Image (cartoon, helix red, strand yellow):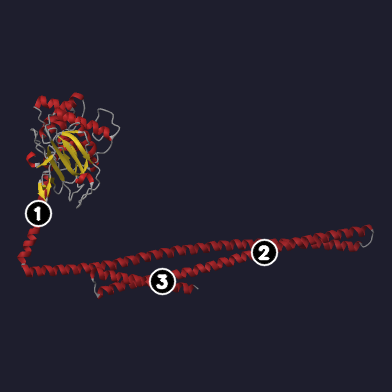
Amino acid sequence: MEESGKKEILHQVKREIYHIKKVTVHTAQQDGEISDPDIAIADTTVKRSQQAAYHLAARTGKLIFQRRQKDTAVRSLQRTKASEKQQTASSKARQQSAAKTSQRAASQQTHTGTTSTKSNSGSTSSYHSGTSSSSSTTSSRSSAKTKSTSLKSSDSGIKMQKKDDIRFASYFKEKASEAQKNAADSGKESQKREYAVEKAAKEVAKAKLTKLAAKKIAADIVQHGIFGILGTFAIVVLMAVTLLMCISGSQASEEERKRQNASTGAAAVSDTVLQYSDLITQYANDNGIGRYVALIEAIMMQESGGVGTNVMQVNFGPVTTVEDSIRMGVGYVRTCLEMARVTDPNDMDHIKVALQGYNYGTGYITWVWSNYDGVYSEENAKEYSEMQKARNGWSIYGDPQYVPHVLQYYSVSSGDVEFITDGAAFAWPVPGHTNITSTYGYRWGTLHKGIDISDGGIEGQPVVASRSGTVTRADNACPHNYPKNSSCGCGGGYGNRVEISHGDGTSTLYGHMLTITVSVGQTVNQGDIIGYVGCTGYSTGTHLHFEIKQDGVQVDPMPYL
């Protein structure tokens, strides 16, 4: 039985070793296309693993045999204990039966002796009978004592046998633990050997690749000459040096670049701020500063990054929701813009005064107009901060660098349109995007009644009111915001659109928008955001379709813009 178990273990080990050898060699051949000597190295390593596995299997078989011997000894001991218990019980029963028999015999003899004495006959016989009874009782007691001693000796033997069994079991448990540890060690060694084979295969592959690279370089030298190779090397070195110079120059001019970024909006506004664009636009339009949405987003980015409830960090009223903070913050921005006398989104000189006033309070704006003719500078921002710290006994007052901190997020291109306000003139409807893909006029046999404005980055960009007026149509039900070659039937082909009447017989139309932000009857100012560029309705690509009507008839918009 033990021999067959051992053979089965050895058979399993052989199968595993064959599998390891096959996979290892196949992997090495795939990785590096190794040669026969490399395979021979792998065979040697696998054979060593095989020998270790054989020893492990032998120890495992021996352990199985020892365990079976232990089980046999334990079962034999259990049978011996059961037999001794039965013998002890039988001995006690016989002893009790003999004692009862002796007592009955003694009682009968005593009764017979008494009868003989009273009749004055058989006295001698009575004496001998009494003597016999006494002798029988003494013999029974001696026999019981002997059997009790025998039982005690038997119990002592059982206890000794039990102690031997415990020691025997402990010994085999210790041997089993030792065998398990040896098996684990052997497994680790096998893994190490497999790793060595794999590593050797990869090294061979790497060497072959290096050899191929060397051959390629030699071929290049033959084909192009040594000077061509040196020239290539020189170009690589020059590029590396140039890169290092750029990095060093970038580090040295970091502060200067930040100052330049203050007017270019190089840093991006986060998505956590942009998620509130609709609310910002709503309250900006309500306050008549729809053109300054990008500036308000830049302020929010600096104040909170759009995180928390008080995203605009206002402190002059209860703030229980994000909308409360935006409503009060946008209103305060309007106050600062008005006090700083800002004229449009490009009026950076006065916007800087308004921004520092948002941080310090409007007292700064009044002070700047009184002392510096309304011109902001970093020096007077620091001066005002020091003055307020001394006056209030504080260690900190506001952020003297607040203006450059905000302007790094403000892209002037979001509002850099020359808004013309002399009578009939109209502003460009998509600030910063002036590429026209289709003009007013006939195309494909029909009249194109407006202009199409589009470029690579126009999707989702704000669309502004070209001129102040009242919204007369606002369609926002089209969900088909994707290019199409036929009309989806929304908004008469215009998709999501807005129409604004300007009160002098002129009106404007804005079509194919992603979404709109105004409603019918709402009054808008020139430059207020009314929606965002999209591809809804009958639109083959993302763009804004813009029309100007004179007395209800479409005309070429370009002379008006």
* Residue in the foreground of this view, choosing between 455 and 304: 455
388 is higher (above) or lower (below) than 79: above
Q: Amino acid at mark 2?
A: Gln
The kind of secondary structure element at disc 2 is helix
Picture coordinates of residue 528, whole percent (x, y)? 17, 36
Picture coordinates of residue 204, whole percent (x, y)? 22, 69
First-in-chain label (3 vs 1): 3
Picture coordinates of residue 315, whole percent (x, y)? 25, 29
Q: Amino acid at mark 3?
A: Gln
Name the mark nearer the viewer: 2 or 3: 3
First-in-chain label (1 vs 2): 2
How crowded pointer 3 is (Cα within 10 Å; few <14, some 14-19, many 20+) is rated as few
Residue under numbered circle 2: 86
Where residue 412 sits, quadrant-wise, is top left
Q: CA distance from mark 2 to mark 3?
A: 48 Å
The kind of secondary structure element at disc 1 is helix
Q: State if disc 3 and disc 2 touch (CB < 8 Å).
A: no
* Residue in the foreground of this view, choosing between 317 and 164: 317
Q: CA distance from mark 3 to mark 1?
A: 62 Å
* Residue in the foreground of this view, choosing between 281 and 137: 281
Q: Amino acid at mark 1?
A: Val
Where residue 555 sits, quadrant-wise, is top left
Q: Quadrant of the C terminus?
A: top left
Q: Which residue corresponds to the image point at 19% horizontal and 35% vertical from the top-left?
A: 471
The kind of secondary structure element at disc 3 is helix
Q: CA distance from mark 1 to mark 2?
A: 101 Å
403 is higher (above) or lower (below) than 104: above
Residue under numbered circle 1: 241
First-in-chain label (2 vs 3): 3
Residue under numbered circle 3: 12
